[in-house]
Image (spheres, rainbow, N blue to C red):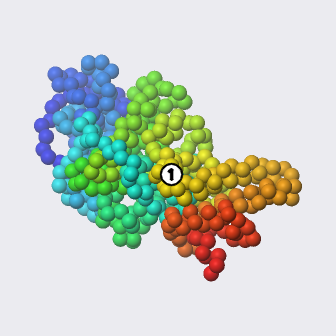
Amino acid sequence: MAQQKQTTYRPVGRVRDLQGQVLTVMCDGQYRPPLRELLFAEKDQSIRLEAYAYENDRVLRCLLLSSYTLLTRGDRILSTGQEISVPVGEGVLGRAMDLFGNPEDGRGPIDARSWRSIHSKGTMPSFDQRTDRALIETGIKAIDFFTPMQEGGKLLLVGGAGVGKTVLMTEMIRGLLNAHEGVSIFAGIGERTREGHELWSWLEKQGLLERVVLMLGNIHRNAAIRFRTAWSATALAEYFRDEEQQDVLFFVDNVYRFLQAGSELSTLASEIPSEFGYQPTLQSEIASFESRLRSTVSNSVTSVQTMYLPADELSDPSIAVTVPHVDSVVILDRNIAQQGRLPAVDHTRSRSALLNERFIGKEHYKTVTEAVDLLHQHERLVRIVAIVGEDELSEDNRVIYDRGQKVLNYLTQPFFTAEVQTGRPGQFVPRTTTIRDIRQILDGKYDKVPASALLYIGSLESLRD
């Protein structure tokens, strides 16, 4: 266990009962710990709790952040007088840890320069309201063209299970880390342990690990730990942004698991649920999380987040409350993945606030506007072709249908992170190349090339080789 500074312990009360990860403590002394204070069991300091809510002046509900197997009714609970803290400083770079700062990588104790509360103190720095920050290239054609990223912006990858969210994020991590000079933080919330291990191994192999911190709260951990892992990761981002004056790349996989953990805890705490069974504090929780990932006047926090889509339903409240906080939303569609087009991005439903001529330039704006119009027409024609066949289309509609299919096929791409699975070498395509290539498809310069030839290529230059 990582060491923190010594504290003065004060008695709080005794354990009354336990509901899942919500522990009820009967306060039997004068001291009433404030909410969010870190508590522990007197008989075993490894049993940690956090003050969550008061039912009345004597009954305190706490989040259990450890195993329940050692707890018994009547155990005495003490207060540390502090909130949960996470180690910060250069010593955490290149390490994987849990929300308390305990190492998860088998490399021994973390060399902590200091500790920082995982909760925001409410004294937020002045946020940067500039709109002239540089665009960031990911090297992924579908992202850079339809949903571009800006330094200090946020991008959300939305999709159901098995449509490629994690693979797409890992590819973006590769593209962004190679050009990023600051610190990167990866928050694994409610995901598989295997995925965290694969990311760790890949970062180490690429020589990128020493500039990255991995904060892990995997799916086998209880809901309280998964919920607070998000706060711990944002505390690290705030530290490097404000104290170290560095630009931060912040990756989250998966935001839905954070909200789901909050919903589980809310139910266990007997709070009245809102629509679809979510916690009544759903909007405030995601707002608090996202507001801490803002850029300041001097430094930026650029965030890429994934979000699981329950039952592939875009109207789910978890999606509705998250989307207003991000700049770009990438919708991954199961039907597209089943057609064999990866990344499985639905370009007609994905959107970006940066699709403005002032942000992306005249040529990109003109090309993406025409491409979106073409794909909407192509989507309409696909339904007609499914009924009557392509031969029944007029000559003009046949051209639209063919060019639309070529744009969709061109936007598929072999990934570096999937080379072992696909056998295709990865391709990084600059944004200017993507704009130029799609412009040529729209202008009909590749009308004589079969659409299948554009599947899983880099640039159109490869067709001439």
* Helix, strand or loop under label 1: helix
| Residue 66 visible in this rendered orientation of the protein | no
Q: At 26% from the left edge and 20% from the top edge, which residue is drawn?
A: 58
Q: How far across and how far down the image is residue 88, in percent?
A: 23, 52
| Count of labels in the image | 1
Residue with the most extreme bottom position: 465
Disc 1 crowd, CA 10 A, few/some/many (<14, 14-19, 20+): few
Q: Quadrant of residue 32?
A: top left
Q: Residue at x 49, y 31 (%)?
A: 278
Residue at 44% from the left image edge and 40% from the top image edge: 325
Q: What residue lies at 60% left-to-right and 46% top-to-bottom? A: 349
Q: Label 1 is placed on what type of residue?
A: Glu
Q: Mark 1 points at which residue?
A: 357
Q: In this view, does 438 lie to the left or right of 233?
A: right
Q: Where is residue 334 in the image (x, y as percent from the top left)?
A: 64, 51
> Looking at the rendering, which quadrant does residue 246 occupy?
bottom left
Q: Which of 144 and 211 is in front in this view?
A: 144
Where residue 41 appears, as percent x and y from the top left, is 24, 37
